[in-house]
Amino acid sequence: MHLLLPTPEVLSLKLVQFSEVCSHLLDGASSSHDYQKILCSFVRESGMIILDNFEESCSYTFRTKYFDPILAWVHEIFVGIILEEQFISGKEKCSGINPKIRTEFSSCLISLFHGTPAAILGAIAIFSDANRGFAASNTPFQKTDLDYSIAYFVTDLLHYVVFIPGDVLFIAHHLATLFVIVTCRYVVSHGAFSVVVLLVLAEVTSACQNTWTLAGACRLENRFAARVYDALSPPFYVVYTVVRGFVGPYFVFRMVLFYASGLASGLVPTWVWVSWAVVVFSAIGVSILWVYSRWVELIGERTATKLEQKEYLDVAKTYGLHPVSLAIAFVLRHPLVASVVFGATKSWQLQEVLNACKIKLTSEVIEEINKIHSRFPNPCP
């Protein structure tokens, strides 16, 4: 079994064509169809390895009928999603949105199309294999799931290289993940059980994470996005912590113990499983640090909000004012404020608002409020 790799001359030519088309697209001088055509050609020539002998029993007709079209078809779908967001929605619908946010949106969009389907396909591939195990040979269904993931990671990798080249950590993550999947799929043809389980664990939170990311990117400009972000954060962090902090490490620990015992000797070489372990443990470590920082941020925000509210209530209580009256009186004292918009559903609420219009805050009250503002910058509750 050997690999059909493109020559350096072909790769160089495709890379030049790819760069030129991307440049034209960014300048608005070319069509998205040209971009997709060259990008697909480039990826299929350079990134997607086609086996000369898929298996001893597989004919050329089988390879061309099933294997190559899977990669090309899925890849072109992902490219089409990027094109729609970057060059159609981005220019016609979202011209006012920050280009960086729009680029991240494209990445999240193709991740949504990959993550959940890949997790479902992976689960089916695992449980449908009666001989599943760390040293088992790759089944056709597992190979299809790996091909699907390769198409996604290659597409998103190129997307980041072109549009967000400064995100070195994300690019390194995709390269390392591709190394694991490609070596499992094409080099050893064994161990797909391990890799597919890890893919399922990685992608099981994909839908929630991408929704959370998109909401977080827009939460300062969109109130609904802010509510979605706040509502999703705690449950997402909990699930992510359990999967990445406990289930994932436990599975990798069992995988390493199995391979280290020598039970897969001759099937999965030492350099392969050791490299897999290094990549996965590194990814888990980064994930744990990331979710830890999110927990610290969330707890800090929630705690700060409660402290702010308590201090405002204490000021109102100290000076015998209703919190609503205090807030409205403070806003009305600003020389550039002519009116205040409020909502009242009961008569006593309306009365408090009317009373606030007559209140003149003393310098002591203003000083107390400004002290709170200095510790908790706006927006304050």
Image (cartoon, helix red, strand yellow):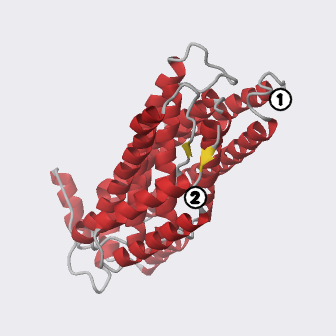
- At a point 48% along the width and 27% down the height, the residue shown is 141
Mark 1 nearby-residue class (10 Å; few <14, some 14–19, many ≥20): some
Q: Is residue 22 above or below residue 65?
A: below
> In terms of depth relative to the viewer, which is nearer, 100 or 135?
135
Q: Is residue 71 above or below residue 9?
A: above
Quarter of the figure with the N terminus: top right
Residue linked to disc 1: 260
- At a point 36% along the width and 59% down the height, the residue shown is 82
Residue 177 appears at what percent x and percent y?
61, 47
Residue sitting at the far right? 261
Q: Is residue 319 above or below residue 66?
A: below
Residue 209 appears at what percent x and percent y?
46, 46
Residue 273 appears at what percent x and percent y?
75, 36
Q: Quadrant of residue 380?
A: bottom left
Residue sitting at the far front? 60
> In terms of depth relative to the viewer, which is nearer, 186 or 115?
186
SS category of the residue bearing label 2: helix
Image mark for residue 122: none
Residue 293 visible in the current orientation: no
Image mark for residue 170: 2
Q: Quadrant of residue 25?
A: bottom left
- At a point 79% along the width and 41% down the height, the residue shown is 271
Q: Amino acid at mark 2?
A: Phe
Q: Is residue 106 above or below residue 278?
A: below
Q: Quadrant of residue 255?
A: top right
- Alpha carbon separation for disc pair 1 and 2: 30 Å
24 horizontally vs 157: left or right: left
Residue sitting at the far top? 130
Quarter of the figure with the C terminus: bottom left
SS category of the residue bearing label 1: helix
